[in-house]
Each structure stands twice: as structure tokens, then as C-alpha cells.
Image (spheres, rainbow, N blue to C red):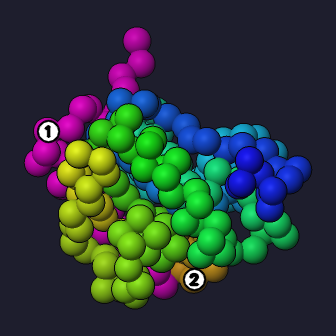
């Protein structure tokens, strides 16, 4: 109820993908396309995310994709600190239930919210950060949000480097197969 007050008229965008995923990808909040479809990352940034996953031999069907906020902020503005903090327990519950081996935060907002810090995105990249969710310890990785890559193509190379590290670590942790084979 508390969350609904500020977000009247928007659609719940809970998450999408494998509920037993070894990798959970976390963005900041749904946009207009996500609000319309009820699925995270379905617009231009979502297509780019799908392409990025494909480039490292991963498929959306084996990961779980969620956002810090489960509703689109009014006027598509950045989520406020209050909104992020009120939404965080629901994301924590999702992570507790899924128990992923890895979390990949897309962008500064999701990284700073989930890691509870104010560190610059550039300083968070290219390394694993310990993340406790309930009694479950996981690794948190950080890279640029696909929407940011659409605005600033110079960040594509660092993002490519980040996701290659994530892929390498994913394989080291002996996570489930990244590509679901069709029969």
C-alpha cells in the first residue's frame, strides 16, 4: 500500500526469467515499454541487454531479470532514495528465494542501492563485491545500464569487458548451462 500511493496508475513489473537462476540481473526501474508489457527490459535497452547476453553465450531464459523498483516512477524520472529504500525489501525477498550465485547490477542506481553505498560506478566495475541477502552470500558485479550505452557508445567497450568477466566467473562457479538447447 505504501508503495502504491506514489505510483498510482502504473503496472507492477515484478521480474522475469528463471526463478532458479544462478545469475540475477538488476536494473533501476521499469520504463514506459516495461510498464506497458509488465516485463522488465523489453524496450531498446532490453533489446541491447538481450544482445549483450547473446554475445557471451547467455540466454534470457536462464537468468532472472528484475529492477529495484517494481513500478515506473512518475514522468519516467529517476527513482528517489525513498522509493528505492521502500522497494529494496521486495528485491531482497526475490534474491532470498532465487539464491543466485551472482548478481549483475546495471547502472549506478541499482549498484548503489543494492550495495548500500555511494561509490562511483567506475570504481565498482570489474570486480566482485560480497552481497549478503538474508543468510545467503552472493557476488555482486556492476556495469553500465544498457540505456546509458544507447546515450553514450563510449561505454560499450568497458561494458563488454565487464560482461566477459561475469561470463568467466559464471563458468568458474560451475553455474547451470547458459544456453537452453532447443529440441
Q: Is residue 132 visible?
A: yes
Q: Residue at x 42, y 18 (%)?
A: 182
Quadrant hosting residue 125? bottom left
Q: Residue 52 at what x, y percent from top left?
A: 45, 56
Residue 133 lies in the magenta stretch: no
Q: Write the start and end of the magenta stretch as one range.
A: 154-183
Q: Residue at x 31, y 86 (%)?
A: 123
Q: Which residue does the numbered mark 1 point to in the structure image? A: 174
Quadrant hosting residue 93? top left
Q: Is residue 28 visible?
A: no
Q: Residue 63 at what x, y percent from top left?
A: 41, 40
**Residue at disc 1, secondary structure:** loop
Is residue 126 rendered to the left or right of residue 121? left
Q: Residue at x 52, y 73 (%)?
A: 109
Magenta stretch secondary structure, dominant: helix
Q: Residue at x 55, y 37 (%)?
A: 16
Indicate whether 119 appears above or below 179.
below
Is residue 144 rendered to the left or right of residue 117? right
Amino acid at each position: 500500500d505504501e508503495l502504491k500511493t506514489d505510483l498510482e496508475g502504473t503496472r507492477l513489473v515484478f521480474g522475469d526469467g528463471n526463478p532458479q537462476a544462478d545469475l540475477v540481473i538488476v536494473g533501476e526501474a521499469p520504463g514506459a515499454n516495461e510498464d506497458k508489457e509488465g516485463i522488465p527490459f523489453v524496450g531498446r535497452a532490453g533489446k541491447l541487454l538481450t544482445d549483450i547476453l547473446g554475445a557471451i553465450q547467455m540466454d534470457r531464459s536462464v537468468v532472472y531479470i528484475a529492477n529495484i523498483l517494481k513500478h515506473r516512477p512518475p514522468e519516467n524520472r529517476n527513482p528517489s532514495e525513498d522509493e528505492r529504500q521502500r522497494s529494496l525489501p521486495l528485491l531482497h525477498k526475490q534474491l532470498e528465494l532465487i539464491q543466485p550465485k551472482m548478481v549483475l547490477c546495471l547502472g549506478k542506481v541499482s549498484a548503489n542501492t543494492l550495495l548500500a553505498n555511494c561509490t562511483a560506478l567506475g570504481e565498482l566495475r570489474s570486480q566482485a563485491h560480497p552481497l549478503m541477502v538474508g543468510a545467503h552470500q552472493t557476488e555482486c558485479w556492476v556495469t553500465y545500464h544498457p540505456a546509458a550505452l544507447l546515450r553514450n557508445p563510449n561505454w560499450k567497450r568497458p561494458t563488454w569487458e565487464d560482461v566477459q568477466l561475469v561470463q568467466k566467473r559464471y563458468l568458474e562457479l560451475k553455474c547451470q548451462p547458459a544456453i537452453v538447447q532447443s529440441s
